[in-house]
Each structure stands twice: as structure tokens, then as C-alpha cells.
Amino acid sequence: MRSMNVIQSSNSSLWRGLSAAGCCVAVIFMSLAAEAAKPKKEWKPPASKLPKVVTEKPDGPVMKVAPIDRKARPEVEAAAAKIDAILQAYWREHGAEPNTKTDDHEFVRRVYLELAGRIPTIEEAESFCAASGSAKRGKLIDDLLESPGYVSHFYNFWADILRLRERPSREVWFEPYMAWVKESIAENRPYDEWVFEMLTATGRISENPAAGFQLRDIGTPLVYLDNTVRVFLGTQIGCAQCHDHPFDKWTQQDFYKLAGLTNGTRYSINQVLFGNMNMAAGGGSAESLSAAATAFFKNQDDLVYNVSKINYERGLAEEADEIDRGSRDYLAALTKMVSNLDTEFRLPYDYRYDDAQPLDIIEPTVLWGEIPSAAQTADKRTQFGAWLTARDNRQFARTIANRMWKKVMGVGLVEPVDDFQEGNIPAIPELLEHLTDEMLRLDFDLREFVRIIASTDVYQRLAVEYDSTAAEPYRFTGPALKRMTAEQLWDSLLTLIAVNEWAYQRPSVAELAPGISVDVSAINYEQFAEAYKTYKQIKNDFRGRLNRTSYKGLQLVRASELPQPSPANHLMRQFGQGDRLAIETARQVATVPQILTLFNGWMTHAMLEQGSVIYDEVAKQKTMRGAVDTIFLAILTHKPTPQMRQLAEREIKQAETPAAGCGNLIWALLNTREFMFIE
Amino acid sequence: MSRDLHQSLQLLDDRHTRRAIMSGIAQSTLGVSLLSGWNRVLEAAPAAGGKKAKQVIYFYMGGAMSHIDTFDPKPELPDIQGEVGTIKTKTPGVLFGEPMQNLAELQDKIAIVRSMTTETADHGKAAYWLKTSYPVLNSIRHPSMGAWIVNTMGKLSQTLPPFVLVGNGNGHPGAGFLNPSLTPVPVADPAKGIENTELPEYLSEKAFKRRLSLADRIDAKFKSRYHGYQIESYDQMYKDAVTLMGSKDLEAFDLEQESEEVRDRYGSSRIGQGALLARRLVQSGVRFVEVEYGGWDMHENVATNMATRGGEMDQALGSLIRDLDSSGLLDETLIVLTSEFGRSPAINQNAGRDHHPAAFSFLLAGAGIQGGAVYGKSDERGHGIDEDPVGLTDFNSTITVACGLDPFKEHFSPSGRPFKIGGGGDPIYDVLS
């Protein structure tokens, strides 16, 4: 058994001796093999090493993020205090007490996870804890809100809501739209503005990436309406597509009247020309369609001619092996475009209520309130977008206020966040209304809103276990205890491995542009083939860059930069990353494969490779005490209690080599509930 | 349905009221009380000689499978039937959708119910309701049928999990309020089985145990603060993971153990490999295997999509039924295939079908089931129900009885609320053996 003396007297570091022997740190386990049943078997260290791009520091800033207004700090504090005052009155009324305050270590861990999507590094945590003064928490919040981690984390949040996948269907590209969502977050564009842009976007995704929102429900305008109202107005009118809503007030006629505003959308060039969406509703004569189509394409004949001609020649080239089959999807994607066609819209053939006849023409109207006067003469989708995002459509502000409150605090004031209805009474109505006012006062600046909530006194409290089925109601006496999301877990593991967590970023809109900004109505086949070549080059280039971050098949980059969603057996999917097929499918429920992956999977192994962040930090240590502290700080963001230290040191002494003991300790800490949950 | 009728149905939604009324009707016309249904099962079962199921393989077709194109075709109405043809089954007059080639041949071994109906066209909510018999409520987590059945019937294997889910499992109701140990173990990719079950070569079992105990003791402080449901579930999963790692039966999860020929027979699709995995797991003593297979949300091009998806499902199920039949396991295994709702009889502008909760079909086969039964009728267009409507609780109570369990016995949740396995619906005795 090794004694502490051996370590302390060594003039080289704890791990260096092993590294010098030319082995990766997994060698620390080597001598354990001797303990096992097969002592003679020669142990070979795994050949693989971490890719260089992730073990070296990036050479410049990784992302431009809109700066935060530091001077506004006092106003933020004042706004936070108002929220606290409402909560205090609520607690008094219910005899509740706020939870204990977090210490600096607890706070720094949580706020990194919540605002930057990962645990802090040792350096980040220590520099925060060592700082003095009462302003340091506010400063950290502000720092994090203008970090790339904020953009990445909130992108993941929206990706689950907006169902972002690279290919929602074979012929729809989503890369430009996904890049646009991320860029909108980085630029901190006002929420009402980017929602309006999505709801009203026309054109191809390459020239107007916001059109992706409409294309996510390509071909299904009624499903689109249901999803849109659910996400942005927190209201579920989907039932009313087929019959009056059984529990809410919405009638089938309400649904169809609203659908009259959005149903005119067309999704492809062909649809605009032939209007096939309209056949279902039973309306629209050939003349009206052709007139509408002409309005969009002045050179209608050129377009038809062009697309057919490109298609034909593409087919010939494919036969001659001069171009691959992927070009078919490429052409199809180029013809996908959103346009408005203001045709009449009818009730379904099986409408069965007394207030109208089947197939009656619908006079489009909104669910409540009025279409803002400025938009009344605009096309119907613009009318819809203007109504939905209007300041006086209070439900729009209320829905996002509740959603962002939940994002930070863990539990919405209305749950589920997308099911507001009369019977679903907010937990603290006056707080919800106050937050709605705040959202309006901030002109839908979501980051500023998050800044205020993170600055409240209640957010400085330790987490409280929330169980919607518990007899004792949750009183918002602290944020709710949450398991890390799949992305937070991935990015936290990455923090322990990668010096550069940004070794790869998805292509931006500008980077994609040369390969996709092609007007199919104005090119010939040669130009098409050239454009396809450029597109493939860009794709291959990015794929190559991504693959350079691979370790044992895992691409060691931030979750937001990985292909989405991850394959079904990826660590993130095991930990409940959403499949992005429906709205908000991510879950944080325990399953056996999660544990097996943490036990034996490659992410755990990667940590024990030379060059990983935690490996190098531990290797710098000269004493056992230093090694144990480092491991605790890196993984759990705090030093061990005396009792924990005793356990840890005993393990290191007991292990065949100190390095093996350190490996065991790292493994053990990763497999605590404390690591996985946000306290 | 008129507005008034809609409202009255809502008033009647209380199951007790409804059954009381229905049993009143039954008593006056048939002289039997449905409230004594369980007695009837006990009496009827031995008479029919039906063996009850020991194990269950449950196929869930996520996204809502079209009933018209599978088990309830409407060849008389071409505008509804669309491009997907029909195929004759063993029983004259009983037609299936054309992709059901294998199942048509096996029709004498399966029961079809054509009159299922549900209440919502939202995928997530409908799936929860289907699997638990209850709508999503904020105040309670309902257990899925798999959890109920394992909870009541127990484990068959000491080391293998009693409940396996082939699929990703996000959003699955799982154990609900029952013990977290009843949470299904998800297998995301059946071809890969359960991964990461082996310790690294350099790690001895002794060292592994030491690591576990170290983790546990360091976690003590955190656990003194937090010990609710979420934490408890993780504690349980850690125990289960360790048990599973030590299992000698792990090769049940390994499809490589099957010959190429057998794997091809089930099809390379995820449902094909999932069905084969289900067979292996049932053979090794897993009580309840659920196979999730998505991709049925065919708002577009239902004909081409049905040809592939439907064909894959038919091939998988056909091979499974044949294999279980020849090994004798079909006498002990219940097979269920269903989805959260059906698809509209009307074909939409994109040659697809939209959501349709008012009428759809499901399939039962194997232990406890009368092969060849066709129960219930949708209307002429496949839009509503003409005869013998079957609700979600009736469906789940039928599964309950097929497993030899009492569908009317009350079980209590930790908060003391009474529940029945299957939600207290009326079992469909006409399809039960």
C-alpha cells in the first residue's frame, strides 16, 4: 500500500511519472489488473488520445454576443426586489419560509449551469469565490449572460420547443434556420420581433431563414396553427380542430376562423402554381389560383420551365454518374418556399354544429381582441402575426413570462406552461401578472428578464424538491431541484474533458449562403450543378471539422453544435434529450442505460485520458490533499468536508497506485446524485 | 354529435355513473350485472379452456396508425380507401389493408377490434391516456400498463429487468406512482441491445464495488438534504444497473446470437429487430416488453408510407407470431398492437390522412385471446363507431383479464387513491378466450 509520504516526497507530480512512462492516464488502472483474477495478462493502454483541437485553447473569441448594459444593474436589483416582495407576502400568507441561502460554491455552480449550460471550471469557481463584495453575484450573472455558453444553452432550450432538426423531412433544410435561431439569441433580439418574423416569413429558407418555422409543419396548416398557438399563446386549441374543445371554451368554428388567417400558406413553388392546398378546403377556382400565382412570380413561365429543365438535365447527369442522388433533395429543397395565397377557406365537410353548414366559407377572425389597425390591410399571415405578438395581446407576454420564469426557477406559475385555461389557476396570480408587466416594460428582452429573475433573493436560495403530486404544495421558497438536462450534463462532462469546448461550431447563415442562395427561377443546369458542388463542399468541410473533434465516435463539442437530435443511443438521448418530433419532448427521468453509460461509457473514459482538463489539473498537484481538492472542485464545485476527504484519501491509499485511486475518486464523484442534480 | 349530446356525455364521464347505468341496462335486458364481471371471467375462463398470459409483448405504433389501411378497410368507398388496396384473410368477408400480407394469413390466430375510440388528437396526451387509462393530470403520475402488470405479477428473472422498452422512452409514463423499480429499461436501438454493460478490462469487480461505495458515502450529505421521488428513482436505477451488469442472461439482449436468416425474416427495420429482441427477452423471462415504433403520423402520402411502414410492421409481427406459435410460447404470451388514435377516413390535399380519435383499431393475439375474433364496427366511412364502442379503459381491462388479473380489484396509490388495473373499464369478453 502506498503511503502519503511517497506522494508528498515525490518531487515530480502525482501523475507525471506515469505520463513520462508514455502511457495515458488509464494506466492508473493497470495495477488493478493485478488485483483481478488474471494477474499475468499483459495490459495494454488504449491507443486513442483526445483530439488535438479540443485539448488546445482557442486562439480568439469564439462568438460575438450582444453586450449587456452593465449600468442597468441597479434597476435590475430594484426589479428583482419587487418580485421578492410579492413572494414574501405570499409566504407570509401561507406560513412558508424561504429556504437557506446558497453559499458561494453552491451559487456559482447553479448559475453557471442555469445561464451558461455547464458546471464552472475550477478557475471560474475559485475566482468567483475568492472575490469579495456584495456585488459579485450580480456581476457573475451579467458576465454569464454575455458569454457564448448563454447562447448555446438558450439555443438548446428553444431547439426543444421549436423542434429543431437538421432535416425535418428529406427535402427541407434546417441548417440556415437553426443558425438563425442561434444568431437571434446571440444578438439578443426582442422576442416579439423574432416571433413576428417567423410567423410572417416568406420565401426560401436560404434567403429568409425564419421561414423555417412555417416549414417545420410543411403541408399541415392546421397542425401548424395548433402548434403555434400552443407555443406562443400557451393555449391548446388543437381539440377544436375536430370538435368543440371538451374542457376549454374553444369551438370548432373558433379554430377554423383563426385557421382562415394562416391556412393560405404555400410551401413550395409547385403549390403556388397549382394551389393543391386549396382543394381540401373545397374553394378557389382555377382562375383565382392562377391569378394569385402570377402575383408571386412575374416570370411564371420561366420558373416552370427552369425547374423542369433543371430537373430533366439533373436526371440525365445522374444516369451518367456525373452527379449524385443527393442533388435531387438539393433541388427539391431549393423549391421549398413559403408564400401567402389569400384564398377563401371553408369549414370541413363533416362540420356538425348548428351554427353553420359544412363547407361554409369562413370569415377569418382572431380568438380574442382585434387585429392591430396597422396590419388590417396586410396579408392574412401578417394580420395573424401582428395580432399574436401585439403588446395588448397580453396572453402572448404572459405565456413567455411564465415560460422564462420556469426556465430559471424550475416550475411555472401555470403548469403546464402551454395549457392556460380558465380552470388552470396560476400558483401566484399577482406574481404572474407582475411578471407579464415586466415582460412588456422590458419590450420582450428575454435576457434582461432572465437577468432580473436570477438576481432575485429567492434565486439565491438552495433548491427545494418539487413534486407536483405531493400533498404539500410547492411555495416557491427556492428554485426547484432539477436534474441537469441532457445538454447540461453533456456540456458539463465536456468541461471536465475539453480545454476548448468550442472546437467546432455549426455553420452560420453567412457561411451556408454560397451553397444555398440560388434562385432556381433564374439559372440553367450548369449553374445548378455548380451550386450543388459548392453546397457539397461546404457540407463536407464542416463535416470534416466536426469529425476532427471525435474521440471514440463521440464528437467532443458543445451540445448546441452537434447534429440534432443525437442518434438514439447517444449519451444525450439516454439522458432524455428530446427527439424534436413534438414540442418539448426532453425529459429528466432516471433510466438504467444512463447509469451504464456513466459507469462504462467513453465520456467517462475520456476524462482519464492525458490532456483532459481534469487529468492535467490533477497532474499539477504535488500533494494528495491537493489532488483530492482538485477532483472535488472540478466535479462538484466544492472542497471535500473532512469526512469526505478521509474517505477519498483512504481510497487513494487503498488503490494499487495513487493514480488509480484518483481515477476511482473521479468515477465515484461523477456517479453521485449531487453531480447530476442542480442544488 | 349535437352540442347537447356532447355535454351529456361529459356529465356521464364519471366511470362509476356510466357503468351503473350500463349495468342497469344490462340487468334489465340480459339479466346479468356487469358489476359482477370478475365472477364472469372466473367462470368463463375454465369453461373456454383459455390459458392466461404470463408475459406480454406490446407494440405501440407512435404517431397514430391508420385503421383504414390496416385492420378496418373500406373498399366500398374508393375515395376513403384511397390507393392502399385490401387483402382477403382466412375468414371470408374479413378484409385487411393490403400491406398486412402475413397477418392476413395469420388472422385465425389474432383478434381485431375495430371500434376503439379516444378523446384527444394530441399525440403525447393520447399516448399517455392509452398506456395508463387516465388523462394527463398535474397532480398524479399514473403507472403504465407494463408497470401495473409487473407490479402485480412480479419478476420472472432474478437479474433481467422485468419491463423492457424498445425505444427511446422519452415521455413514457413508466412506473408512475408505483415503485421506481418498475420503470422500463429502454433499449434505444434493438440491433445494439444494451450497451456499456461490461466493466473496463482493467477494473476488477472488487474495485468497482469500492467505487460504488465511495460514491454512496460521499453522496450522503446531499441525500440528507434531498430524498424525494427523483432522487429515489436514481438510487433504484443504480441498483438495477449493477444487477444487470452482473447478469448471466445479458445475451438475451444480443441479436447477434440469432442467425442472419432469422434476423432477415423479421426484417431489418427497427420494429423487425425490436420484435425479434422481444421474442428473445420473453424467452429469457422478461415479463413485459413494449416495442415503440414511430413514423405513423402520415399527414402526407399515406399510400407510399403505408407500403413501407405497414409492410415492416406486418413482417415483424407475422414472424413473431409464427415463432412464438411453433415454440409453444404463444400460449403464454399476449401480443398487443395499438396506437394512440387513428387516421382520418378523408384523404387530405397531400394524399395523407390527418388525426382521427373517433374510431380506430387494435390487435390482440396469443394467450388469453380468441384467435379469429373480429369485434366492433366502425361506421360506413370509418369515421365514427356503429357497434360496440371500446374506450381506453375497456381496452386496458381486456389486457388485464388476458393476463389473468382482476380488472375490478382496487389498488391504492401512495396517497390513498383507489385505482383499478386497466382503469376499471369493461373487458371485451368476446375476444377473450
Image: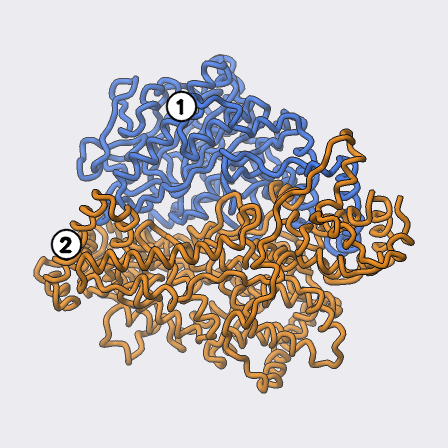
> What residue is pinned by disc 1?
B265
Residue A551, image x, y percentages: 57, 49
In the image, what residue occupies the spot 75% across and 61% down?
Answer: A633
Q: Is residue B200 visible?
A: yes
* Chain letter for the part of the structure drawn in orange: A
Disc 2 residue crowd, few under 14, some 14–19, many 20+, Cα 10 Å: some
Element under disc 2: helix
Q: Foreground residue, B119 or A210?
A: A210
In which image quadrant can residue A458 be found?
bottom right
Give the quadrant of the N terminus of chain A.
top right
Q: Given the current orientation, which residue lies at the most extreme front position? A: A21
Q: Colour of chain B?
A: blue
Chain to which the residue tagged by mark 2 belongs? A
Dot 1: few (<14), some (14–19), or many (≥20) neighbours within 10 Å? some
Total labels: the figure holds 2
Q: Is residue A322 left or right of residue A614?
A: left
Q: Does residue B386 show up? A: no
Q: Amino acid at mark 2?
A: Lys
Q: Which residue is mark 2?
A: A309
Which amino acid type is shown beneath numbered disc 1?
Arg
Could you say whether the residue bearing mark 1 is in a helix, strand or loop? helix
Instruction: Tell me if B213 is positioned left or right of B106 in this view.
Output: right
